[in-house]
Image: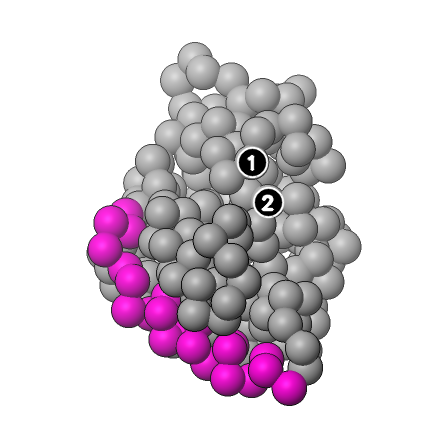
């Protein structure tokens, strides 16, 4: 039997909420304003905006450009909704047993949670809280520390390769949810599922246990 976990640490975009259309719309508008051409396609899912901006523009333009993409993303929340199975999984977890670790700014994370009708947890770690974003493990380590826990006793739920890498580097067990990228790009995770609706959480004396829901098996469930 797999061990119980002390807490579940969730990524936000693509894991708890579906924000991909809004994200891509905001970045397309940003790219047009920055003169990057109509063919620009946002490929930075899972990365902090500052890292995407720094890679795309000269250093003397990054501060203003970063402020602008944050403004656009906060404003463009139409269509953001919870991911399949996410509300039910959160209802299964007591308040002190879960946190969010996101590459969003705090302002953006709160705006997107509100748009999806989800409440923010007591521990919400954002790009504003760490010097190095995913794939660095800093966010997951900080979330565990704020909860008074060992990250090795936590389950992280992610949807991108950089997120999986960050959680694994923090020594979390990693459950990856396919959708933002195909399942085969998430093979570095300990488990991969197509949807959180395939899973359920069960609180027992030794912690939170991850179970299958019904007869649909995750991609690489052992």
Kindly state the secondary structure of the residue where label 2 is placed.
loop
Q: Position of residue 184 (x, y in %)?
A: 65, 27
- Residue 185 in the image: above or below residue 140: above
Magenta stretch in the rendered image: 60-81
| 108 left or right of 36 in image | left
Instruction: Specify the quadrant of the image occupied by residue 141.
Output: bottom right
Does the magenta run of residues contain 70? yes
Does the magenta-highlighted stretch encompass residue 138?
Answer: no
Does 174 sit left or right of 87 as displayed? right
Question: What is the distance, in whole Å, between disc 2 and disc 1 at their CAs?
Answer: 7 Å
**Residue 77 in view (yes/no):** yes
Question: Horizontal and vertical percent for residue 196?
Answer: 43, 34
Which is nearer the eye, 52 or 110? Answer: 52
Q: Earlier in the sequence, mark 2 or mark 1?
A: 2
Give above or below for 65 relative to 94. below
Q: Where's residue 75, x and y in %?
A: 28, 69
Q: Which mark is residue 181?
A: 1
Disc 2 residue crowd, few under 14, some 14–19, many 20+, Cα 10 Å: many
Name the residue at 48% across, 27% down: 194
Q: Are the residues tagged 2 and 1 within 8 Å (C-beta)?
A: yes
Q: Quadrant of residue 56?
A: bottom right
Residue ID for mark 2: 160
Which SS does the magenta portion mostly show?
helix
Residue 121 shows in this picture? no
């Amino acid at each position: 039997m797999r061990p119980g976990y002390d807490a579940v640490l969730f990524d936000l975009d693509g894991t708890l909420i579906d924000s991909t259309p809004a994200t891509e719309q905001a970045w397309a508008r940003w790219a047009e304003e920055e003169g990057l051409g109509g063919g620009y396609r946002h490929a930075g899912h899972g990365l902090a905006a500052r890292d995407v901006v720094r890679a795309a523009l000269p250093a003397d333009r990054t501060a203003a450009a970063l402020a602008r993409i944050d403004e656009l993303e906060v404003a463009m929340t139409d269509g953001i909704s919870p991911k399949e199975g996410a509300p039910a999984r959160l209802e299964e977890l007591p308040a002190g047993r879960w946190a969010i670790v996101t590459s969003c700014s705090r302002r953006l994370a709160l705006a997107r949670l509100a748009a999806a009708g989800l409440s923010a947890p007591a521990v919400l770690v954002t790009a504003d809280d760490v010097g190095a974003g995913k794939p660095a493990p800093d966010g997951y380590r900080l979330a565990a520390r704020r909860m008074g826990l060992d990250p090795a006793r936590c389950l992280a739920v992610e949807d991108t390769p950089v997120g999986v890498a960050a959680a694994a580097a923090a020594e979390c067990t990693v459950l990856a949810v396919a959708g933002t990228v195909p399942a085969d790009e998430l093979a570095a995770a300990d488990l991969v599922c197509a949807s959180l609706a395939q899973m359920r959480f069960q609180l027992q004396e030794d912690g939170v246990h991850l179970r299958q829901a019904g007869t649909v098996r995750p991609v690489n469930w052992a």
